[in-house]
């Protein structure tokens, strides 16, 4: 049960001196200690940077509707967190914030806006409380956060069913289908291209975090939720109107604890609000990032 809770937030990837992925010409690889990270850089060559951090079992491709829109105004970076996409497999406990710090250092980005969804929001918030001098603003969409435990019985049951099935049968087409039917993965306003994209990302994920608790990330102590009172950066928390109740509870907890936080309820959106309502999502995020404080 504890692992199920932990997995609701999962994050980052890195690069090893092991076999590296075949690149498609768009991305690059960064070696980080015992792993490697796949990343892409686009948009404006100068000015403020925005780093996009994806959700659990997904990868950098989930930001397809944001890539060009954000790139018109910012230098834009997206990467596959350790254990996901084209980054190295997570083989043991690791620090997602340390991976992100290494990526920013490599790209010579002194300070960046962080935009994360679900697990990616947890990574962004953890990084911001630990490295406040490296962050401009944070957008936490459909956030999960370590230290939160008040999930609904329904979400517990959904995750428990998937973990149980994977433990018995492994990560295969059948268990992937089970995961794809969890409420967090279903779009409320399905568009064929984005529904197909979600399925492609889940099919390409290797299931490590479902099968190996040893691959869990380490966010440090005290938990990020308890450290939000020290958050020094402006924060926008986006929650879909039709997201699962657990996520709304997490949103409430974050907004109550973070000193400079505002909440946005995105109409007609579920958990993957950037794919459900990309135009509204993009407009809200860009307005927040460009607003002078």
Image: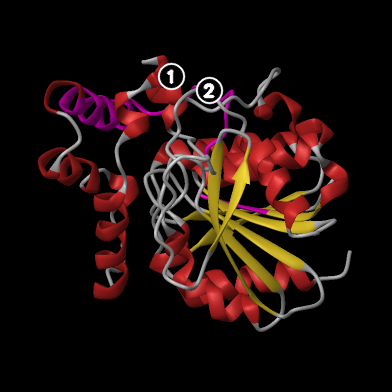
Identify the residue at image location x=47%, y=73%: 25
Check disc 2: other Cα within 10 Å, few if <14, some if 14-19, many if 20+: few
CA–CA distance in space, label 1 to label 2: 6 Å
* Highlighted magenta segment, given as a residue range: 139-166
Q: Is mark 1 on a helix, strand or loop?
A: helix
Is 222 on the left-hand or right-hand side of 191?
right
> Does label 1 or label 2 sit earlier along the sequence?
2
Q: Position of residue 106 (x, y in %)?
A: 74, 54
Q: Are marks 1 and 2 in contact (CB under 8 Å)?
A: yes
Is 238 on the left-hand or right-hand side of 258?
left
Give the vertical position of 107 relative to 120 (above or below).
Answer: below
Q: Position of residue 186 (x, y in %)?
A: 28, 54
Q: Nearer the viewer, residue 146 or 23?
A: 23
Looking at the image, what colour scheme do you see?
secondary structure
Q: Is mark 2 on a helix, strand or loop?
A: loop
Is residue 212 rendered magenta in the image? no
Identify the residue at image location x=69%, y=64%: 50
Q: Where is residue 61 in the image (x, y as percent from the top left)?
A: 43, 63
Is residue 220 visible from the viewing direction of this image?
A: yes
Is residue 235 visible from the viewing direction of this image?
A: no
Quadrant where the C terminus is found in the figure: bottom right
Quadrant where the N terminus is found in the figure: top left
Label placed on residue 214: 1
Label placed on residue 93: 2
Label placed on residue 268: none
Q: Quadrant of residue 161?
A: top left
Identify the residue at image location x=77%, y=58%: 112
Is residue 158 rendered magenta in the image? yes
Q: In which quarter of the image is residue 108?
A: bottom right
Give the vertical position of 40 relative to 129 (above or below).
Answer: below
């Amino acid at each position: 049960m504890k692992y199920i809770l932990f997995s609701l937030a999962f994050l980052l990837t890195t690069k090893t001196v092991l076999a590296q992925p075949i690149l498609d010409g768009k991305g690059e690889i960064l070696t980080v200690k015992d792993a490697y990270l796949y990343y892409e850089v686009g948009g404006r060559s100068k000015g403020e940077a925005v780093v996009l951090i994806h959700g659990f079992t997904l990868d950098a491709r989930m930001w397809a509707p944001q890539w060009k829109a954000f790139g018109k105004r910012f230098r834009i970076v997206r990467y596959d967190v350790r254990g996901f996409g084209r980054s190295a497999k997570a083989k043991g406990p690791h620090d997602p914030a340390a991976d992100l710090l290494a990526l920013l250092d490599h790209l010579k980005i002194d300070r960046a806006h962080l935009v994360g969804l679900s697990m990616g929001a947890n990574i962004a918030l953890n990084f911001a409380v630990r490295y406040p001098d490296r962050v401009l603003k944070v957008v936490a969409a459909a956030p999960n956060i370590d230290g939160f435990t008040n999930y609904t019985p329904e979400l517990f049951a959904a995750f428990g069913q998937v973990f149980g099935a994977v433990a018995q049968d492994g990560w295969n087409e059948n268990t992937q289908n089970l995961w794809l039917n969890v409420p967090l993965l279903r779009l409320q306003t399905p568009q064929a291209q984005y529904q197909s994209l979600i399925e492609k990302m889940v099919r390409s994920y290797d299931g490590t975090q479902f099968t190996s608790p040893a691959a869990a990330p380490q966010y440090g102590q005290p938990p990020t939720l308890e450290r939000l009172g020290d958050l020094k950066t402006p924060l926008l928390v986006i929650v879909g109107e039709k997201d699962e109740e657990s996520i709304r509870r997490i949103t409430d907890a974050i907004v109550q604890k973070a000193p400079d936080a505002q909440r946005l309820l995105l109409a007609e959106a579920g958990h993957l609000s950037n794919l459900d309502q990309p135009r509204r999502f993009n407009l809200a995020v860009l307005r927040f990032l460009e607003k002078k404080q």
